[in-house]
Amino acid sequence: MTFTPRIQPEIYRLLAAWRYLEHAALKITAGWGRGAADWQDKLAVCHHVWLQAQIVERLRRRLAMYPGGREEAPVPQAFEDLANHLLLARDFPQAMAGLHTILHPALARAYTHYLTQAHPVHDRPTLDILHEILALKSTQARWYEDYRTRNPAPLDPAYLDRAQAYLAHLGHLTQPLPPTEPHARPCGQRAELAMPVTPGRVKHWNHAPNIMPFLQTDWAHSVEARRLYFMIGYFWEMGVAENQLRWIYYADFMPWDFVLAESRHLWDESRHGNSGLARLHDFGLDIADIGYSSYGAHGEGTLAPMTPREVYEAFYHVTQIAETGYFETKRYCFQDFAAGGDDASAEMMQFDIIDETSHVEYGRLWLDEMARRAGISEDYRLRGQRDRAAAQAASDARVAQLRAARAGHVPQAPGTDLGGSAVYNPAAGGDLATLRNPAAQTHCGRLLQILRDRQPLRNIATAPQRPNLPM
């Protein structure tokens, strides 16, 4: 029998149920987020994960305020049954319908019901929290209304009707149910979600030839190449966010505070992607002019579940290699763009550096604990120093080969991949054949000329020589 202190009011049980389902909504959004295809929908799912994290955090803090309160107070397994049913939709549109026509409206109605029934003074802390949550949910509702206007395909009535039946069994989330055993486990732990290998494709994702090998070879001596590279590189950082959705979904082995931090990290990376695209838009360029392949993701089928070790490795590579390794590069590019009179590009670098500083701190806070929970024994700091040095050496070798190829000396077969992981590095993985593609060379020159015509840099001839890209 579960003991409940008499001082705990019925709202405590309601908050426990709401907390569980709001966390489930976070996981469902993250789990299905890779299915978003349109750019605004990719942005939305990342933002919604962050909104859900803020909602869960508010409910957890309130639960902990009660005598004997627990931030993850147990709830009956029936709540897990509802969450897993919503999770196991047949596709992205159905999953979003489950969230936005069933779960979110039911929670909003439950919150509104409590607001109308509770004493306006005695439980003011909870009432304030519920008002804040309803405001966050209105942002999600506005997105879904627009999404359905753009995607009016029929929904599965059986899927939605069964969800409604689960809700009715749970008293439509307005009845405080005792935490009878068996207790609900986190959404998805007893239900296998299959995530697609290839995230949803944006329109015109493959219309443009790859120009990164040209920008990589010109990087050190051309401030114009550096400017265009970072517009594209930031735009492509949405690919990082698409991978982070998986880490967050499989992060149940970590404390909640890690999920909260990573949800912010995810939203930041998606915004970086939008920053790059917005800067391209400033010059009249769009996705069709650049291309977007989710860092080269391709193939049919689904991905295997991530293990704790795999989550650790992914988190390590982003925070310790891609982010830590690029700080010096981003700082001197900020200086170069500011000196060249392109304040908007300099500002883009400035705000990215601010975010990346927080992200590297997340690594310092969480990598040791993540390693312990994943059964890994290593000093990630020493490993990071070695791996960053190896990445720089590999980049230098790749640039040397690319430059030799551009000069007419082809050290390897034209289609040879020059190595380097393209997962978090848009310049890696280029092959020599790209440099022999006249269309790619012409396209690169055209893009540089567009930037030059619309906003020339004052320091084209005077910008310092810089090191090669760090990876």
Image: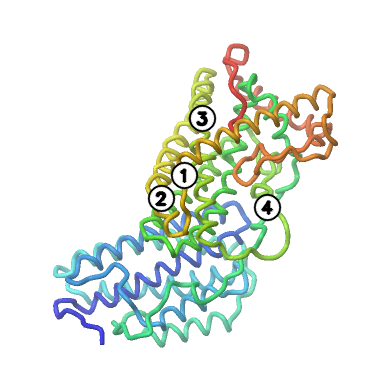
Circle nearer the N terminus (2, 1): 2
Give the CA separation, mark 2 to mark 1.
8 Å
- Tell me the tag on residue 324: none
Circle nearer the N terminus (4, 3): 4
153 lies above or below 254: below
Instruction: Give amino acid for label 1.
Output: Tyr
Q: Residue at x 69, y 29 (%)?
A: 397
- Read off the residue under disc 3: 330
Between residue 375 and residue 397, name the one nearer to us: 375
The reply, left or right, for residue 66 in relation to residue 311 is left
Instruction: Give amino acid for label 4.
Output: Ala
Query: Where does the image place residue 42, in percent across and percent down from the top left?
Result: 56, 54
- Read off the residue under disc 4: 297
Circle nearer the N terminus (3, 1): 3
- Read off the residue under disc 1: 380
Tag 2–tag 1 contact (CB < 8 Å): yes
Instruction: Give amino acid for label 3.
Output: Lys
Report crowding for label 3: few under 14, some 14 to 19, many 20 or more residues within 10 A (C-alpha). Answer: some
Of circles 4 and 2, the one toward us is: 2
- Kindly state the secondary structure of the residue where label 1 is placed: helix
Between residue 2 and residue 26, name the one nearer to us: 2
